[in-house]
């Protein structure tokens, strides 16, 4: 009896369980139908762009259902500042259930796009494919789906650094340093603050600080900022880095800062002063001083070939090293290239002796004026190695006065010329001949008379 009751109870449980399973089977769709295909965009890289950019964008597309998706077509629309380059449609043949795939598009940002967030509208059409026990393979069109791809356009500016008056900085000298600030492709910029800094303190602004303020800078507009700077007189020559900073008001009400660098060259050159010291015994002495702020190595003083002067012997003198403030003396055997330079030659003196004294005075005055107006400048080259190791040449023009002939020498030569010219005068020669004959006849007469008296005494 108890066994029958247990058997009857077990059978009832089994029947109830089977009934529940049947109900569940009836309420669940056939497994072959699966979940509808669902196309979604799960990733966009990159999303940050700048005005003027043309970039490739990678989109990750996913089928969020179990049914396969086929004939997937994306249509991209234009926004105010961002557009797709090339075809605005992208086609994917199929995408299996739960699977993902990357596709690439190219977008362009307008040059004048202001900073901010922008989106590109996208629509997608596709069909889903699945197998049905009763219907076989089924391809079913799905409703159109719309998306938005969001990009962040960052505003920006470019600092263009140019040297207007400054090719290089010389130690201890004031130099103009110009920076050109250009707004390229952004929305108008306002409340800009520009500054620069040299970390070692070698280059410093004078007459102002290192900061300039710009109230407004329109798209494509440029402005020049001028500083007067001086390089420390004790600094080493070479290239120095300037750190540049530009801060401006961003579109969201905050501030953005752009930092960049440029280089400024501090020259290793120096300068020289060359003066005429004296001229004696055919030697011309020059004083050479390093008047710049840098030392000069391997200094050579050279007299180049020139029209007014010529050098007898060596045309170059090796000095060695000259620190700033040092000087040295060099000598060369410099002579005028022509006899008429700086005085008269012997031929001219001879010619002058044939003139009257008044004419000679006038001629001397003419020579003096000519000598005063002539260019008596001697070209001198100074070759040296500067503080950066570069070999350089400096040309100087030095007024000199070669030693003129002394007055005694001039009078002596004049007398010699006069004596030479007298013996060329026929009247003077004739007079001398007559006087000589008279003197000779008188001497002959005296001797003859003395001889006659001596003969008479002997006879007596």
Image: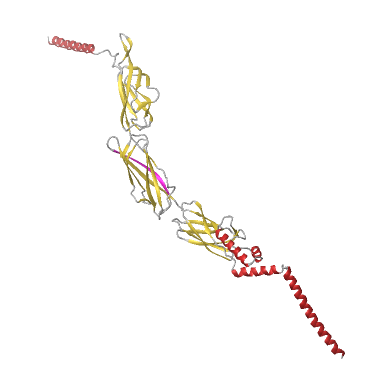
* Residue ranking furthest to the right: 459
**Is residue 257 within the magenta segment?**
yes
Residue nearest the viewer, comparing 290 with 38: 290
Query: Compared to 43, does 418 lie above or below?
Result: below
Return the x and y of residue 385 as percentages of the image width and height: 49, 54
Magenta stretch secondary structure, dominant = strand
Q: Quadrant of the N terminus?
A: top left
* Residue in the picture at 50% in, 52% down: 391
Quarter assignment of residue 214: top left
Read off the magenta span: 255-265
Q: Is residue 410 left or right of residue 274?
A: right
Quarter assignment of residue 55: top left
Q: Quadrant of the C terminus?
A: bottom right
* Residue ranking furthest to the left: 1
Residue nearest the viewer, comparing 349 with 9: 349
Return the x and y of residue 109 as percentages of the image width and height: 36, 30
Quarter assignment of residue 448: bottom right
Return the x and y of residue 260 as percentages of the image width and height: 37, 42
Return the x and y of residue 48 as percentages of the image width and height: 33, 32
* Residue in the picture at 33% in, 18% down: 125
Residue nearest the viewer, comparing 201 with 23: 201
**Label total for image:** 0
Query: Compared to 443, does 204 lie above or below?
Result: above
**Is residue 297 within the magenta segment?**
no
């Amino acid at each position: 009896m108890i066994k029958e009751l247990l058997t009857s109870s077990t059978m009832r449980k089994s029947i109830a369980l089977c009934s529940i399973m049947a109900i569940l089977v009836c309420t669940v769709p056939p497994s072959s139908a699966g979940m509808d295909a669902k196309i979604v965009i799960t990733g966009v890289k990159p999303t940050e762009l700048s005005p003027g950019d043309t970039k490739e964008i990678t989109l990750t597309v996913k089928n969020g259902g179990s049914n396969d998706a086929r004939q997937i077509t994306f249509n991209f629309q234009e926004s105010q500042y961002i557009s797709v380059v090339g075809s605005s449609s992208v086609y994917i043949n199929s995408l299996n259930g739960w699977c993902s795939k990357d596709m690439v598009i190219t977008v362009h940002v307008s040059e004048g796009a202001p900073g901010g967030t922008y989106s590109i509208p996208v629509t997608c059409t596709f069909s889903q494919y699945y197998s049905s026990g009763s219907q076989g393979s089924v391809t079913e069109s799905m409703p159109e789906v719309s998306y938005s791809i969001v990009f962040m356009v960052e505003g920006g500016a470019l600092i263009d650094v140019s040297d207007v008056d400054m090719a290089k900085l010389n130690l201890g000298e004031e130099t103009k340093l110009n920076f050109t600030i250009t707004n390229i492709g952004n929305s108008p910029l306002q409340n800009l603050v520009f500054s620069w800094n040299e970390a070692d303190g070698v280059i410093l602004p004078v007459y102002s600080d290192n900061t300039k303020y710009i109230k407004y800078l329109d798209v494509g507009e440029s402005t020049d900022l001028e500083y007067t700077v001086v390089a420390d007189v004790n600094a080493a020559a070479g290239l120095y880095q300037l750190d540049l900073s530009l801060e401006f008001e961003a579109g969201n009400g905050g501030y953005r800062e752009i930092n960049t660098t440029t280089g400024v060259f501090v020259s290793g050159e120096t300068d020289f002063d060359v003066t005429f010291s004296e001229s004696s015994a055919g030697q011309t002495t020059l004083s050479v001083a390093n008047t710049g702020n840098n030392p000069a190595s391997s200094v050579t003083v050279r007299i180049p070939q020139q029209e007014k002067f010529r050098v007898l012997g060596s045309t170059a003198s090796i000095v060695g090293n000259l620190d700033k403030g040092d000087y040295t003396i060099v000598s060369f055997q410099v002579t005028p290239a022509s006899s008429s330079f700086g005085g008269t030659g012997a031929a001219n003196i001879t010619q002058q002796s044939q003139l009257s004294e008044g004419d000679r005075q006038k001629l001397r005055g003419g020579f003096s004026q000519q000598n005063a107006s002539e260019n008596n400048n001697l070209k001198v080259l100074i070759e040296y190695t500067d503080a950066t190791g570069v070999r350089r040449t400096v040309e100087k023009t030095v007024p000199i006065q070669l030693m003129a002939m002394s007055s005694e020498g001039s009078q002596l030569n004049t007398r010699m010329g006069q004596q030479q010219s007298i013996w060329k005068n026929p009247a003077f020669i004739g007079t001398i001949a007559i006087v000589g004959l008279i003197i000779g006849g008188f001497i002959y007469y005296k001797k003859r008379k003395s001889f006659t008296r001596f003969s008479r005494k002997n006879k007596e």
